[in-house]
Image (cartoon, coloured by chain):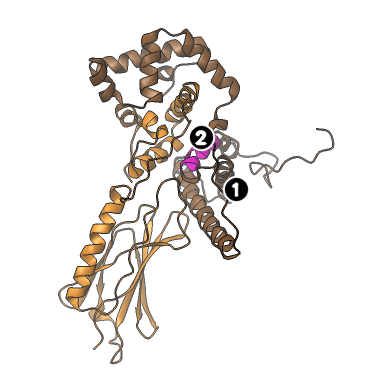
Chain colours: A brown, B orange
Amino acid sequence: MAGSPPRPDPMNEGAPSAAPSAILDLERYRVRLTLFAARRTRDFAEAEDVAQETLKRAVEAIQSNKLRDPDALAGFLFATAVHVCQNRGRAAGREARALRRFGASQTEESSRTDPFSALISHERRAAVNSALNRLNQEDREILALTYAEALGTAEIAKRSGLTEVNVRVRRHRALKRLADFLGVTPKSDREP
Amino acid sequence: MREIDCAYVDEHDLVALHLAGKLDEASAESFEAHFLGCDRCAAELDQAGALRSAFGKPVLEPRAVNSSIAGPRREIWTLLAAAAAVAMIGLGLRNVAREPSAPSEPGVFRGEALDSLVLIVKPGEAGEVALEWVPHPDALTYRISVIRSDGIPVTKTETPESRVVLNVAALAPPPAGVSFLARVEAIDAIGHIVARGGPTALFPAQ
């Protein structure tokens, strides 16, 4: 919007005009970090904050030359995100105790059944739903058992009377057909 | 924490199980450490989340929380805590290690206190004392401090292992009624203390 101050971006705060490619590359870790934090925070906004803080620290580490080895980045992000979650947890604990001391009631946990539905946009959910409906019953069933019910290959094989190898092959084919309907590159064709 | 690769992820259906909250804490952490750095598994996780959402399931389910200790690491800590208590009573030591803090459950923040390391003291030959503790999952190194019970610092050392052997006989003998105490701090990859054990007496005061 014209005239509005730009939102601070930790990826560019204080960065030189020619930002190292390592810093620019960090953005692709944002969703992963959000999912990482989601399991610990159980709150989407909090998980996003953890991801933001972790990326900010990574930028600082790269700019101050403390993180030079690209292979060490994932380990650094993991350790940092754990630390950020722990610190936020301690702060939340102190805040909750302070509120209790003043007789305030604790904020009720969100009654939403899926606080992380925001990770998947409405449009994407609708597109995947539409693609699922175009699959045959067998394909839809194996994907439902795998991802919705999370039964595991061995359990699916046992229930369906197939071998585990058969289950994996059928799932692979179902995912490929789904990807065709969605117009994306299937997982098996991605580089390992 | 166990290091895993993509083949392991596929073979054990970790993507689907993780989003459904069916992995134990150790497996979930191992998987998280892997997918943070793996484009392939991160993409599969993203796809699986979209599928769960399209099937009307939450993208990420919390892990089932029960009253028992969550995860094999915490079970080991509890067993060693019991063993340490017995060992310390048997050695007649006056300082008792603190009880391990309540295990953190997935989706629940830890409290303000650091995790506790339960220290086990094993006297050895020729004035040596071995100090052992259960490795902390977040620790990169451990800092061991030996102090006198009157507060005078004596020596410090660091080790990535969960065991250290101290040559107490080589230290200047303390005054009568003063004993040597040891404290251990677990330090993570970015230099923060994540757990602490002790002070624990290495020898009873003379």
Q: CA distance from mark 1 to mark 2?
A: 40 Å
Q: Quadrant of residue B197?
A: bottom left
In the displayed structure image, the side of residue A60 where residue A139 appears, left or right: left
Q: Position of residue A116 (x, y in %)?
A: 53, 34
Image point (37%, 61%), residue name = B101
Task: Nearest to the eye among marks 1 and 2: give it.
Answer: 2
Image point (23%, 66%), residue name = B84
Q: Is residue A78 something one can see in this rendering? A: yes
- Location of mark 2 (residue): A113
**Count of marks overlaid on the render:** 2
Image point (31%, 53%), residue name = B74
In the picture shown, does residue A186 fall above or below B79? above
The one nearer the camera, B127 or A129, is A129
Which portion, as a residue range, is magenta? A29-39
Residues beneath discs 1 and 2 located on the same chain = yes
In the picture shown, does residue B144 fall above or below A168? below
Q: Position of residue A63 (x, y in %)?
A: 60, 48
- Location of mark 1 (residue): A63
Q: Is residue B37 something one can see in this rendering? A: no
Q: Quadrant of residue B174?
A: bottom left
Q: Position of residue B73 (x, y in %)?
A: 30, 51
In the picture shown, does residue B86 fall above or below A107? below
- Which comes sooner in the sequence, label 1 or label 2? 1
Give the amino acid type for the residue marked by disc 1 in the picture: Gln
Give the amino acid type for the residue marked by disc 2 in the picture: Thr
Label 2: state its secondary structure: loop
